[in-house]
Image (cartoon, rainbow, N blue to C red):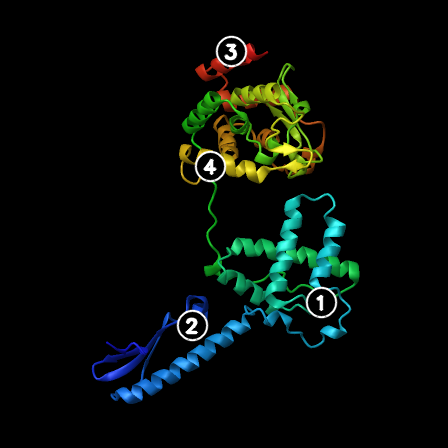
Amino acid sequence: MLCTNDFPYLYQRGSVFYFNRRVPSDLQRHYRCERIVISLRTRSIKAARVKSASLTSQLDEEWLTLRWKKQETPLARFLLDEGSANSNAPSLSQAKDIYLSAKGADKPKTFHQTVERSAKNVTSIVGDRPIDLYTRKHANLVRDSLLDRGLSPSSIRRMFGALAALLNFVSKEEGCANTSAFSGVYLREDQRMPSQKRQPIPNETILAVQSECETIDDQARWLVALISDTGMRLSEAVGLVKADIRLNEEFPHIMLRTHPWRRLKTEASERLVPLVGYAAWAAARAVRESGSDFLFPKYCSEDGCKSNSASAALNKWLSPRVPNGCVIHSFRHSFRDRLRAVECSRDIADRLGGWSVNGIGQSYGAGYPINVLHEWMSKAICHGENTPQQLHLEKRLDSMV
């Protein structure tokens, strides 16, 4: 039982008094248990209160010290390590500017945001120091602080990867040493959250979504339909222009290539994408209705692609129509399964989806002709036969020409 409200950590078991206090959640990793329970070895309420007050004061001081060690106070980042004055290396904020100036010219906005955010996290926690004076202790403090904030281990791992690349580049440019503090930072196994594998969308659900796209018949739905039967990445589809679409050729297709407003993920991403099924319908509708050179002007212009905005809007619309865990990118996973279902070879599947191909021999020659790619795309999407859906779409396309 608790004695009084003034001594909430004091209770009595039998005739002996005990001290019982819960460890704060942000400090539990420093302790073996969630509560500190100690026998005060006294039956005197007066003595128990004195001992309880003393233990409470000691814990408050100890927890304050632990929090200071984690550098979470606004004052700790102003502390200067001994030897800082003797370092000729640029500070992290200066190194960040050097790195972005040299490496960021042709990089997307997300690259700059990642570097800026990573440097800001470090300087706000352990200060803006010369890059050769950061130690593994500083990296561990950053790791612990970000974990306490609720950042996922995978996000922290990506941030440290960006920092390591920044520091390695600038150290070579400036002739600095000892800049490996943020490389290979240890994350305990219990800090590694299991990654959630992206789930494919079932075929019957794809058909239902495509049918609804045809009914609504607007720019966002054309984008969904185009991705659903090509397996393209969202950014690839968003960045298309009318000149990329070849509808009037014997085998309609997309010439997927890099543009100033949209880079491609890998070298293999530049490819020919056959247009069959709902993808052919969506591309024809977008070409016909777009009032600019861009296929989806709502989401793309010469200033860049709004892939994040498109992703948020499309996923919000898809959410009640697809199984839990499925998003717009799940169509790409389904596309790979549809290729497997018709026993498409790995080499052709990689070419159709723009996945990286292995082996020196893969770089020889001009690649598969469009008729071969179109044949396999038709098998995967239309099952190689005139299904009712395919016949219906062909009639729609004929009426649009």
Q: Which mark is residue 395?
A: 3
Q: Is residue 194 visible?
A: yes
Q: Is residue 275 visible?
A: no
Query: Is label 2 in a helix, a strand or a loop?
Result: loop
Q: Residue at x 43, y 28 (%)?
A: 203
Spot the residue most to the left.
14
- Give how far apart the Cα atoms at labels 3 and 1 are: 67 Å
The residue labelled by disc 4 is 316
Q: Which mark is in front, 4 or 3?
A: 4
Q: Residue at x 57, y 64 (%)?
A: 142
Q: Residue at x 53, y 53 (%)?
A: 154
The residue labelled by disc 2 is 31
Q: Upstream in the sequence, badge 3 or badge 1?
A: 1
Q: Upstream in the sequence, badge 4 or badge 1?
A: 1
Q: Nearer the viewer, residue 349 or 16?
A: 16
Measured from the top left, where is residue 217 in percent x and y? 50, 22
